[in-house]
Amino acid sequence: MSSDGPFRPREKLFEQQKYYQNVQKYTHLKGPLDKVTSVAIPLALASSCIFMIGRGIYNMSHGIGKKE
């Protein structure tokens, strides 16, 4: 039986752990592209939903787009 080694050397893992533990940001914003996935995408989804809800309310109140 041969034992497989870890995917990365321990030293490299320890360096990354030290880096991420010393960064003075929130845990979900520590990576370089984490602001895009945790801030920009939800804001875009929320704004598009609010726009579509507003447009639907406007159309209902003015009777636009009714099927006969």
Image (cartoon, rainbow, N blue to C red):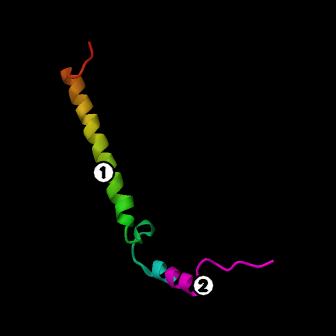
Please, what is the three-letter code of the amino acid marked with disc 1? Ala
Image quadrant where one finds the N terminus: bottom right
Question: What distance separates the C-alpha of mark 2 from that of mark 1?
Answer: 39 Å
Part of the protein shown in magenta: 1-17
Q: Quadrant of residue 23?
A: bottom left
Q: Residue furthest right?
A: 1
Q: Residue furthest top?
A: 68
Q: Quadrant of residue 68?
A: top left
Q: Which mark is on residue 44?
A: 1
Q: Which mark is on residue 10?
A: 2
Badge 1 element: helix
Position of residue 22 measured from the top left corner of the image (x, y, whole percent): 45, 81
- Residue drawn at x 37%, y 67% as measured from the top left: 33
Please, what is the three-letter code of the amino acid marked with disc 2? Arg
10 Å crowding of disc 2: few (<14), some (14-19), many (20+): few
- Residue drawn at x 24%, y 35% as measured from the top left: 54
- Residue drawn at x 58%, y 80% as measured from the top left: 8
Left or right? Give the position of 6 relative to 27. right
Left or right? Give the position of 24 relative to 43. right
Position of residue 41 measured from the top left corner of the image (x, y, whole percent): 34, 54
Is 45 above or below relative to 60?
below
Q: Are the residues flagged by discs 2 and 1 in contact, CB closer than 8 Å?
A: no
Badge 2 element: helix
Is 8 above or below relative to 35?
below
